[in-house]
Amino acid sequence: MRSPIRRSAQAAVAVAALSLAAACGGGFDDTAEQQESGSASLTMLIASSGDAETEAVQAQVDAYEQESGNTVEVQVAADLSQELAQGFAGGNPPDVFYLDASRLADQADAGNLFPYVDQVDDVDDFYPNLVDAFTYQDTQYCLPKDFSTLALEINDAAWSAAGLTEADYPTTWDQLASVAQRLTTGTQTGLVIGDTRDRVGAFMVEAGGWFLNGDGTEATVDTPQNLEALQYLQTNLAAGSFAYPSAVDAGWGGEAFGTGKAAMTIEGNWIVGAMESDYPEVGYTVVPLPEGPDGPGTLSFTNCLAVAADSDAQDAAVDLATYLTGADAMTALTQDTGVLPSRQSLADAYLEQFPERQAYIDGAEYAQGPVNAPGAEQVLLDFDSQLGGLATGDPEAILQSTQTNLEPLVGG
Amino acid sequence: MTAAPAPAGGLQTRPLRGSGGASRAGQGRAGWAFATPQAVLIGLFVLIPILMAFWVSLTDWRGRGSPFSGSVGFVGFDNYAAILTEPGLARQDFMTSLRNNAWYVLLVVPLQTAIALGLALVLNSRIRAKGFFRTAFYFPTVTSSVAISLVFIFLFTGGGAVNALLGVFGIDGPNWFSDSRGLLHLAGDGLGLWDSANPPAALTDGGPLGLTWWDWLSGPSIALAALILLVVWTSAGGYMLMFLAALQDVPADVREAAVMDGANRWQRFRAVTLPALRPTLFLVTTLGLIGTWQVFDQVYLISQGNPAKTTLTPAYLSYTSAFETGQWGRAAAMSFVLFAIIVVLTTLQRFLMRDKDAIAERRAARAVARRRTSTTFFHADR
């Protein structure tokens, strides 16, 4: 029996060698050759909320092609982070792509991004805290194409049914708690908020806390401010006047709000489009989030147009990114898509057109961007999973474990 | 037990093997020539990628460019240490996923095997509309898991059909896919063993591998239980077909002989049918074991590991670690640990389900042979 074993071992080695030869024929290590600018061909990977957005982007890209002579292929990703990962691993990433602020640190840390903001003249026009969201270790990587903030949406019918008037719109935590209680009936919950850092975090900001300190060099999860925020939520969740969407059998706050299971919810400006298409008959008012012990606070969500470090037409890619974040293109791109322009100079014209989005724009001044540390996603997912049990859990233990997990990732 | 037909082989094939030296070499060469394209394909798409993935699990590759370039750092077994030995979130997540998957396997494999066998027995008996039932039982297996998962999401929502049905019996159903309470914790509550809100300190104080005993013994969460129902319902039909094929191979004469011997139905099942099904039983449980340890699509589609990480599985965790958070080395390490678990458990299962009679027979035959050689040797010595 010895020889068959040896022979199959030999065969395995032969197969391996042969396959390797075949596999490496193409090779991984193609060195990128820079294309001549002026007639470069670019690919742009975007995530789109629907046909309207895709068409708006395509129209602007067409205009850019006319002007520059470059050609741009727009690809709409079904799963942006997965398709990006494949592009980077294959050494052939899209030249320009959407990048969510929460993913910036990971991508920048891996060396995937080409920072181009220093080539742009009018960076001052962008909201500073949005540019900060795309700054990692003192390098500004890319320009925000638009943004969204959280505000409080109030169902008008439920509001007047509870005998409340415009003068009662809550501006403090105490008022929020008391109106939520008044609005809570058998089938309706006062306030429904998502059980993730992306909603709960707003309360932490209003209490003067956050996951990281101002310049992102230290984990500050386990603080009295954050504890105050979680305790406030816990009290109201336990009382039943606040609830998570799953508790009222809804997928997200907007669904609970639209179906009347929630009298109030905290969502971003994307809810405007969702309400229009899914629940057009529901009348509602948007007001800024009530102030906490430390004043006003909200969260911002934003995407930038990032340029790949491995792009073979970097100059043209930067050109495209700055064109699409320019005032003209941004005005067109924020028309139908429900997002807010990230340039301060466009705010007035935008509000003239969409006065009901005032509360969202107002938040831009003080909005907190996402946590900006590589590897933080797993820690924050763990935080989210613990928030589900907040009503009966121990807020201090949640903060302590998140602090322990986040500490090794920052300031290193 | 000796009812199963003896495998053809042994003595009969031996004379053939020894004949014709030259033509045998030619046959060998021809054989290799025919096998080579397939072997190269397997090497190219299976063997090499596995070796590459193993290399990735030993590096700190961040998903940019080739993992074999000089800029990628070799970190030895650090990635394995992070998920197996070093206290921290990475190990806690991985162990949570292993716990979930272990409960999942423990429930799915026996349930789907038993149900598949039951269905096959029913179909193998003399019932009417056999073709209709066969199609009906097999239907879930050929339907896309995406479609089935979507249907289950609607069935198991708080106000869905399942809870409406439970409501008829006066049961207030849970909000299935968002309920993270463990079944064993709930059972303990029901029996008065403990209070889940205030678990016994003996269980929460410590435990192996970063999770407390209380966490390990939670049982599947209600959300995971709903996934288990889905998977059992989907896969039982496929395995039923294997059992059905094996049942139709059980020799009729043996069954008749058992009837003549006065064996009742249960005895016939126990002593004739079941031993004849042993190879199929092994196949079904092995395939089940491998499939259930790799569960991914239902988690990806329905729960994404939520609620409270109780539907997190190693395969899904590995996927998110790689594609969402860019920790490719750790993700690859997870998949190799999962591979090791599957190999160990399959080997163990093979050992437990081995044919003890066959082994005893072989051992007896070997003993006889040894005695014979020793006697000839003894004689020669004389």
Image (cartoon, rainbow, N blue to C red):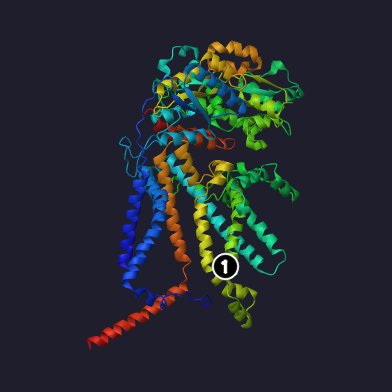
Quick one: B132 or B357, which is closer to the camera? B132
State the image quarter where residue B141 is shown: bottom right
- What is the x, y in percent for residue B65? 38, 35
The type of residue carrying mark 1 is: Ala
- What is the x, y in percent for residue B37? 40, 54
Q: Chain of mark 1?
A: B
- What is the x, y in percent for residue B256? 62, 79
Mark 1 secondary-structure assignment: helix
Position of B1 relative to A349 (above/below): below
| Residue A263 seen in this snapshot | no
B337 displayed left or right of B160: left
Name which residue lies at 53% across and 15% down. A365
Position of B46 relative to A146 (above/below): below
Q: Residues within 10 Å of mark 1 (few under 14, many from 20)?
A: some
A400 displayed left or right of B127: left
Instruction: Kindly identify which residue carries mark 1.
Output: B246
Name which residue lies at 61% across and 22% down. A338
- What is the x, y in percent for residue A23? 37, 45
Figure disc tally: 1
State the image quarter where residue B38 is shown: bottom left
